[in-house]
């Protein structure tokens, strides 16, 4: 996984194109989307800082994921901030004390 802070739009698009595979599951697609978002946030995300919802062809209803579900996915993909990040002055949303 790339871990560059401040990745621009073309970097993110290139990452998606490189990692996407036809026929991936909804769960895999959610993981890929979160991986991609993390690229522009120093490789980390918080469940309160992101929302996830799906509408699939098989079940065309809007389904929003809870913060707990998002946290589980982020944890599985090693995208949650570490305790070291919080000690370095980042708050729970990944912002530094200077950015608030």
Image (spheres, grey):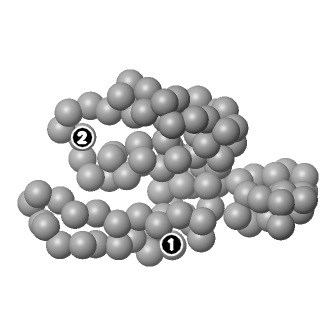
Task: State which quarter of the image contains the C terminus.
Answer: bottom right
Dot 2: element: loop
Task: Identify whether 14 is placed above or below 70.
Answer: above
Instruction: Tell me if I can see residue 15 in this picture.
Output: no
Is residue 75 or residue 15 the one in the foreground?
Answer: 15
Label 2 crowd bin: few (<14), some (14–19), many (20+), radius 10 Å: few
- Who's the residue at 24% across and 40% down the image? 24
On the image, which quarter does residue 47 sit in?
bottom right
Give coordinates of residue 28: x percent, y percent.
33, 46
Disc 2 and disc 1 in contact, CB within 8 angstroms: no
| Residue sitting at x 54%, y 55% | 74
- Give the left or right position of residue 91, taking residue 56 as reference: right
Q: Residues within 10 Å of mark 1 (few under 14, many from 20)?
A: few
Point out residue 65 in the picture as x, y percentages from the top left corner.
39, 71
Task: Locate residue 52, reporting x and y percent.
Answer: 41, 64
Residue at horizontal 65%, vertical 47%? 41
The label number, if any, that marks residue 24 in the structure image: 2
Q: How many marks?
A: 2
Q: CA distance from mark 2 to mark 1?
A: 23 Å
Question: Residue extending furthest left?
Answer: 58
Q: Is 56 drawn above or below residue 40 in the view shown?
A: below
Give left or right: position of 28 versus 2. Answer: left
9 to 48, vertically: above or below: above
Mark 2 or 1, nearer chain start: 2
**Residue at the disc numbered 1:** 68
Quarter of the N terminus within the rendering:
top right
Q: Secondary structure at mark 1?
A: helix
Residue 59 in which image quadrant:
bottom left
């Amino acid at each position: 996984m790339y871990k560059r802070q401040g990745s621009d739009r073309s970097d993110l698009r290139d990452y998606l194109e490189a990692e996407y595979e036809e026929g991936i599951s909804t769960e895999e697609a959610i993981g890929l989307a979160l991986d991609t978002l993390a690229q522009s946030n120093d490789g980390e995300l918080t469940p309160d800082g992101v929302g996830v919802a799906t509408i699939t062809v098989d079940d065309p209803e809007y389904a929003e994921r809870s913060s707990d579900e998002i946290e589980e996915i982020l944890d599985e993909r090693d995208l949650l901030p570490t305790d070291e990040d919080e000690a370095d002055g980042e708050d729970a949303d990944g912002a530094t004390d200077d950015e608030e």
